[in-house]
Amino acid sequence: MELTAFRHQVGGHFGILSCNGHVAKPSNLREMAFYKVMNSELKHFSPAFCKEVDVRASVNPVTGQIIVEALEKLDCHKKKSSSKHERSSTGFRQNTDGHVTVDTEKQWNPWAAECQCKVVERMLKEPDPTPFLLLENVVAHYTRPCVLDLKIGTRQHGDDASESKRHRQLMKCRHSTSATLGVRVVGMQLYEAETKSYSYVEKQEGRRIDAAGFRGYVKRFIKCCGRSRAERIRQKLSKLRSLLAEFEGYRFFSASILIAFDAEAADSSSDDAVKVCIIDFAHSTFSGFFEDLAYSGADEGCLLGLDSIVEAMEPSVPKEPSSQMSSYEKKI
């Protein structure tokens, strides 16, 4: 089962690959365990976890073409891979200098390409297969996915973080909207119908912007999705907020909120017109999970972040000046 580059990754520092209606990310023991014991209600707001598979990469020494393949096949989400962007899958190629590139002439998020190529380069150096988690690709049936990835919470590091990593994560939060709003932009992808191209916002930009800049980006995303879909996003965020408020002792350190819609589809209030997911559970915890520290109450930092997202969607919030927006946005 071949794995290819995933065009619609907008955040994270590990490369995400695409595979037969799934996304594949490097395996993490804690995250896999969290998925396996996930609360049934929370599963409605998270991509389905399907399986851990071993993946191997090899390169054709003549053409430089790289084959990345899982050592077993999985068909549980195959039907969702019928959209235009999934049919035209994209692989990798090794240059004469040994570096890996995404083998495409299409417009591609440069951050996503960099992360994915690093993952493939590491696999080429490893003699043994690399374990990956296969998750449901929630945008697989979208033709022109627009995606907003938001790091949620006022704290990003897990309890097992080293002192140096703890310090780095504290600084990232302190010097971004994570500290004040409980959320920051990790990445955004919007399809521009006028230019028939995507515009991107990357995580470094998300760390630099202030509260007004954060609200400006959220407002732009919401404006593009249309009134009906915007209302559906609000409803789903509110429902997720109510659910997490009841989760005693849970902490979602370094998790993200993923919001997506299809720019090719007409504005609609149907449930599947938008996706609102909580993702990335490598540092999440709850009472009795592994031998983690026990916490009491709900994750207030996470709830603050959800409140800030909903607030940013409201028309009463002052609009960010256009000059600041253009200084952070990159168009490819």
Image (tube, rainbow, N blue to C red):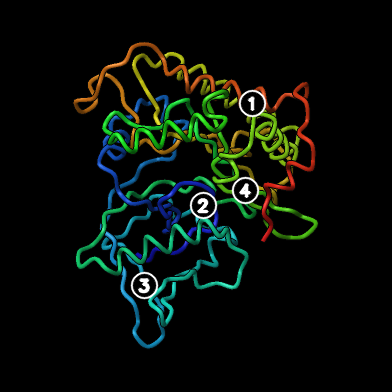
For label 3, the residue is 67
Which element type, helix, strand or loop, lies under badge 3? strand
Residue placed furthest toward the top: 297
Judged left or right of residue 164, residue 171 is right
Which element type, helix, strand or loop, lies under badge 1? helix
Q: Which of marks 1 and 2 is nearer the N terminus?
A: 2
Mark 4 burial class by Cα count in 10 Å: few <14, some 14-19, many 20+: many
For label 2, the residue is 9
Of the 4 image quadrants, the one containing the N terminus is: bottom left
Based on the displayed image, in which of its 4 quarters is residue 148 positioned? top right
Amino acid type of the residue tagged 2 in the rendering? Gln
In this rendering, the answer to whether 14 lies above or below 304 is below
Q: Distance between the residues labelled 1 and 2?
A: 23 Å
Which element type, helix, strand or loop, lies under badge 4? strand
Q: Where does residue 119 sit, x and y in percent of width and height? A: 37, 60
Mark 2 burial class by Cα count in 10 Å: few <14, some 14-19, many 20+: many
Q: Distance between the residues labelled 2 and 4?
A: 12 Å
Amino acid type of the residue tagged 1 in the rendering? Arg
Taking depth in this image into account, of 313 and 172 the one nearest to the observer is 172
Labelled disc at residue 201? 4
